[in-house]
Image (cartoon, grey):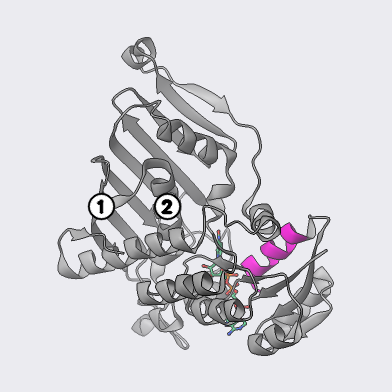
Amino acid sequence: MLRIGIIGTGGMGNHHASEFSKMKDVKVVACCDISEQRRKAFAEKWKVPAVYADYHEMLEKEDLDGVAVVTVDDMHAPISIAAIEKGIPVLCEKPMATNLSDAKRMLEAAKKKGVINMINFSYRSSSGLQAASKVVSQGKIGNLKHVESSYLQSWLVSRSWGDWRTSEGWLWRLSTKHGSMGALGDIGVHIYDLTSFLCGDFGQIYCKLKTFDKGVPENRIGEYVLDANDSFVSAVIFKNGALGTITASRWATGQINSLRARVYGDKGAIEIDLDRAYDEYRICVGQKNIDKAVWKTVKCPPTSNNYQRFIKAIKTGRNDPSDFENGVKIQAYLEASFESDRLGRWVNIEI
Ligand SMILES: NC(=O)c1ccc[n+]([C@@H]2O[C@H](COP(=O)([O-])OP(=O)(O)OC[C@H]3O[C@@H](n4cnc5c(N)ncnc54)[C@H](O)[C@@H]3O)[C@@H](O)[C@H]2O)c1
C-alpha cells in the first residue's frame, strides 16, 4: 500500500483525493491545510486519519511514499523542496512556481536527492492528446508550419463555477499579492504545455497580457487587489520553425473550460478539441483528403491519467515525461511572456 499525503485541501485537493481513492494500492493517509474548516471537511469526506495545519509537521511525523502539493501557487516551491529534502516523491500542481529561479531550485533539489517529481499538467491525461503528440512527432503531418491553440474560460462572467466575488478560491487567482500569475499562470500554463507537447519547444515569444476592469470599487475586494492579468495573446516561433498563436482568457463568455489546438503541417493537419472529447483527435492527411479538406475523427484507446502515472513513477523509480525538467521549460515560457509584455517585443526563450 502506497501512503500519500495531500497538502492543500481546496477544490483541486479534493480532485486529487478522489483520483487516489480509486486506486486499490494507494491510500491518502495524511492531509494538511492552513484552513481548519477545509482540512476538517476534507479529512471527514475522504476518511483521512492524520490532519495537520503545518506541512513541516506533517512531513516530519508521517511516513509517506508520496506527497501532492495542491496549495495556492506561491507555496508550491517551499513545500515541494521541503518534501524533496525528506526524500519524498512530489506531484506538484501547476504552475510549478511563481518564478523561474524557484522552479530551477525545485528541479536541482529533486536531482540532488534523486527524488521522483512530476507536475500535474492535467490535460496530459487526454488519450487524444497523447496519441496526437505521437502522430506529430512521427512526422505524419510533415514539417509544422502553423499552429493555433487556446484555453478559454468565462468564470469572470458566468456563475457556473460559483461567484468569484465571494469565493477565496477565485479571489486569490485575481491578486498578484496572493501569489497569482493571472490567467497566464493559471490556464496559460496548461495551453503552453499542451502546445509544446504537441508541436515541440518554443524558441521565441511575443506576448500581450491584459487586466480588464471588473467594475469593483477601487479594484479590490477585502484583502484582494484585482491586479492579475485575465487574458493574453502570445505569438510563438517554435524551434522547428513553425509559427503559432496561443491565447487564453477568463472572459470568454459562453465557454466554460475549452481547450483546442490546431496544427498545420506540409503533409497534413491535426486538431485536438477537448470540449468535444478527451479520447479523440481529428486529422486531415493524404493528398485527396487535403484537396477536399476532409477530416477523419480518430478514437484513441485509454491511457493512464496523471495520478496513475505518478504512482507508476514512484513504483518504477522512473520519472514521467511531465517531470520538473519539463515544468522548468514551461516556467521559462511564462517568464519570457511576462518579459515580452513588459518590453513590448519578442523575447528569446532562455532556460
Ligand atoms: N491541474 C489542474 O488542472 C488544476 C486545476 C485547478 C487548480 N489547480 C492548481 O491547484 C492549486 C490549488 O488550486 P485550488 O483550485 O484547489 O485552490 P483553492 O483555493 O480551492 O485551494 C488551495 C488551498 O491551499 C491552502 N493553502 C494555502 N497555503 C497553504 C499552506 N501554507 N499550507 C497548506 N495549505 C495551504 C488554502 O487554504 C486552500 O484550501 C493551485 O496551484 C492551482 O493552480 C490545478
Judged from the image, the secondary structure of the residue bearing numbered disc 2 is helix
Instruction: For the N terminus, give its image quadrant.
Output: bottom right
Figure check: 135 above or below 69: above
In the picture provided, is 160 more to the left or to the right than 185?
Answer: right
Instruction: For the C terminus, give its image quadrant.
Output: bottom left
- Please name the residue shown 27% across and 41% down the image: 240
Mark 1 sits on what residue?
203
Task: Please state the horizontal and vertical placement of residue 70, each as a whole percent of the image.
Answer: 60, 71
Magenta part of the chain: 9-20
Task: Please state the horizontal and vertical placement of residue 319, each as a whole percent of the image.
Answer: 57, 57
Q: Alpha-carbon neighbours of circle 2 within 10 Å: few (<14), some, or many (≥20)?
A: many
Mark 2 sits on what residue?
191
Residue 28 in view: yes
- Please name the residue shown 63% across and 81% down the image: 86
Task: Please state the horizontal and vertical placement of residue 235, each as a whole percent of the image.
Answer: 25, 51
In the picture provided, is 233 more to the left or to the right than 136?
Answer: left
Identity, as a three-letter code, of the amino acid under mark 2: Ile
Does residue 17 belong to the magenta stretch? yes
Q: Say which label, 1 or 2, has the lower sequence index.
A: 2
Figure check: 268 above or below 92: above
In the foreground, 145 or 115: 115
Regarding ligand 1, which quadrant of the image does it lie in?
bottom right
Q: Alpha-carbon neighbours of circle 1 within 10 Å: few (<14), some, or many (≥20)?
A: some
Q: Quarter of the image holding residue 218?
A: bottom left
